[in-house]
Image (cartoon, rainbow, N blue to C red):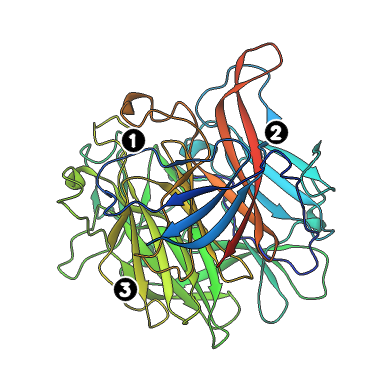
Amino acid sequence: MKNKLFVFCCLLLAGCSSVKPKFSGIKTASIYQEKQNRSVAQIEFGIPAIQQSAFHYQRKNRTIFNLKFGKPQIVAVADKPEGWGYYQFPTISYLSNGNLHAQWSMHADDIRSYGTPSIGSKTAADGGKTWQTAMPDSSLITGYTLPNGDQLRVVDPKPVNLALLKMPPAIGKTNFRYRKTNFTFYRLKDMPSGVNGVYINRLSSGQNKWKLEQETINDPAAVRYSSKDLVPVVWWGDMRTMTDGSLVAGVYPGYYLKDNGEIDKQMGVVFYRSTDNGHSWKIQGRIPFLADKNLDPVAADRIGFSEPAYDVLADGSLICIIRSADGDGVTNGVGNGPMYASRSTDMGKTWTKPEVIAAAGVLPRLLKLKNGVEVLSSGRPGVQLRFSKSGLPDSWTDAFEMLPYDSKSMEVQYAVSCGYTGMVATGDNRFLLIYADFKYKNAAGEERKAIKIREVIVDPT
């Protein structure tokens, strides 16, 4: 489900120090020839990169990437067995003083946990080699930097009790085909103040205090929901600056009214544009749920598209990588869904038909390095990294695996990791990956959840 810690953050900050691990254990790099006609319909274990390793990745007998994977480093380890939602959903970012900041969830994965401060937090002043338990002063937290110097961070407030709101008439409900908890839907434009916009923390240029703002959304077809007698205000996804200086956010949940007046109960991805530095947002475009039923025969039972990652490519077009959500885990028997890609050449107004690029993947993340390489992280089962020179849907490498798992035993699909990741650049050709390992053995040999980071170096040829 959703990473409660997910905020919009600037991953590339000028002046950040570069971590240069010693790859002393690698004398020669392995040569890996890309699989021909690799399947995107069946989950298969990819290229093992569990420990410190190096590869010359070849396509048609020509090396296109030289890759080095550093030794996994520990950020935090649970001191007792933990349930779902704890020691999961990690993020990593830079503080304004140049230190690294890692966070992870310490509460149940449930709507009632939205907006709670129950998180794990550590900082590192040495590029991630050693970590200290700390919650940084708010003045050190960074956000997405706008052309005018403002910084923005989208905030998830606590859901509001339905009984405390003067709600408009409901216009429909989901059914148990898609999830074990029903949703009741309302037109966004008719909802009361406080639950009809988006909450953004703003650090104005030249200031040192963040200000919480409720920004407006202009989207006549948009639909929001209540669940468990609560009304959440969530706006999860990525924000990017266009060439004209405007902002475009690609977010979910993306429920809306179709042209025939019916609610699209299998959610899609929605794109909003702001021309006033994020104070107001207007509908720009949508990627409705459009599954490939040949590759995903249970598509009709999925929640829809969720957890989009998007970026601006070198040619100015937009690429969006999307999870096809699987209901409530394996509750309704549909299991993992394929990961899709779609492209826009008009700033997100229209999008190509989504195409499957991998058999599974939750919360895809995209990171563009200064050497031009696009990095894609995702997971479940396990944790994977893929690389591309262009970012186009058909350009990604085979998956490099960060954790071992049995791809044929989907009953334990969550057993090795939640699959959620975070990335931050540490140089022109390198980055840190943060992820959860559920099978870590502590000093006593006990299996505990752990948060790990690895530095990866990638050079295109």
Residue 228 in the image, given as x and y percentages of width and height: 39, 37
Q: CA distance from mark 2 to mark 1?
A: 30 Å
Q: Which residue is mark 2?
A: 74
Which residue is disc 3 drawn over? Answer: 351
Task: Choose top left, top right, bottom left or bottom right for residue 45.
Answer: top left
Point out the image quarter for the C terminus: bottom right
Q: Is residue 423 left or right of residue 299?
A: right
Q: Point out the frontmost of discs 2 and 1.
A: 2
Residue annotated with mark 1: 328
**Disc 1: CA contacts within 10 A as few (<14), some (14-19) or many (>=20):** some
> Considering the numbered disc 3 on the image, is that residue within a helix, a strand or a loop?
loop
Residue 182 image point, x, y percent: 29, 39
Residue at the (70%, 38%) spot, across then down: 25
Residue 287 located left or right of residue 398: left
Assess disc 3: are there few (<14), some (14-19) or many (≥20) residues with their C-alpha within 10 Å of its C-alpha. Answer: many
Kindly indicate whether the residue at mark 2 contacts the one at mark 3 (C-beta within 8 angstroms). no
Taking depth in this image into account, of 321 and 396 the one nearest to the observer is: 396
Q: CA distance from mark 3 to mark 2?
A: 40 Å
Residue at 80% over, 45% down: 124
